[in-house]
Image (cartoon, grey):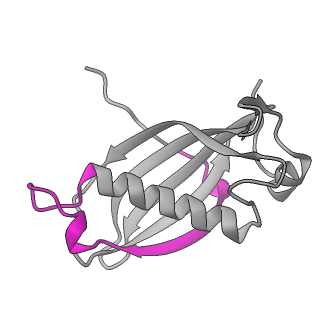
């Protein structure tokens, strides 16, 4: 089976946040479980969007919906480890793009994981994908565009 490789442009990280691995995040292998890492990635995304003034859902029903997630693990994390989530964006298109994550442990500078979440703008009232709002696009002028 082919292995997934994730690499992201260094100049597209816009935000950082620290999250601590809780005891309840540990699995039977005695390290951070995949399900908990996905929850931490979601929390980092929510903090990033909040910092940039992007509401989870606007009054008209438009919000961001995650379309896919890819994660590669490079090292284990354990209870009480602090993890630094660097969050960026790339590959914008008419409807959305990718939110990227580099997750490291600052204590020893170890790369723990890389992740990418695809997203589109979605109107929850009409249940339809909608074009990326101009206000969102303007917040990230350096981001590349793909067709």
Q: Image quadrant for the C terminus?
A: top right
In the image, the segment drawn in magenta is: 8-34
Q: Quadrant of residue 36?
A: bottom left
Position of 58 with respect to 47 (left or right) is: right
Number of numbered discs = 0
Above or below: residue 19 compared with residue 103: below
Above or below: residue 140 compared with residue 53: above
Above or below: residue 28 compared with residue 19: above
Residue 16 screen position, x and y as percent: 56, 70
Q: Tell me the residue at 46%/75% (across/down).
A: 18
Position of 87 with respect to 53 (left or right) is: left
Q: Which residue is nearer to you in this view: 108 or 40?
A: 40
Residue 22 screen position, x and y as percent: 27, 73
Q: Tell me the residue at 77%/32% (across/down).
A: 126
Q: Tell me the residue at 83%/58% (across/down).
A: 139
Residue 112 screen position, x and y as percent: 32, 59
Q: Is residue 31 magenta?
A: yes
Q: Which residue is nearer to you in this view: 121 or 107?
A: 121
Q: Quadrant of residue 120?
A: top right
Q: Tell me the residue at 10%/62% (across/down).
A: 30
Tell me if I can see residue 91 in this picture: no
Q: Given the current orientation, which residue lies at the most extreme top position? A: 1
Position of 47 with respect to 28 (left or right) is: right
Above or below: residue 69 compared with residue 129: below
Tell me if I can see residue 39 in this picture: yes
Q: Given the current orientation, which residue lies at the most extreme front position? A: 125
Q: Image quadrant for the N terminus?
A: top left
Q: Is residue 130 magenta?
A: no
């Amino acid at each position: 089976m082919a292995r997934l490789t994730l690499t992201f442009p260094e100049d597209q990280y816009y935000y950082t946040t620290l999250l601590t691995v809780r005891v309840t995040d540990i699995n039977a292998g005695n390290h951070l479980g995949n399900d908990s890492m996905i929850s931490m990635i979601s929390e980092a995304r929510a903090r990033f969007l909040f910092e940039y003034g992007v509401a989870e859902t606007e009054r008209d029903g438009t919000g961001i919906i995650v379309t896919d997630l890819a994660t590669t693990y490079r090292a284990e994390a354990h209870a009480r480890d602090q993890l630094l989530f660097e969050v960026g964006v790339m590959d914008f298109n008419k409807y959305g793009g990718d939110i990227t994550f580099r997750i490291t442990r600052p204590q020893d500078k170890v790369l723990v994981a890389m992740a990418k979440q695809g997203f589109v703008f979605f109107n929850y009232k009409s249940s339809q994908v909608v074009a990326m709002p101009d206000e969102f696009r303007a917040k990230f002028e350096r981001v590349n565009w793909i067709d």
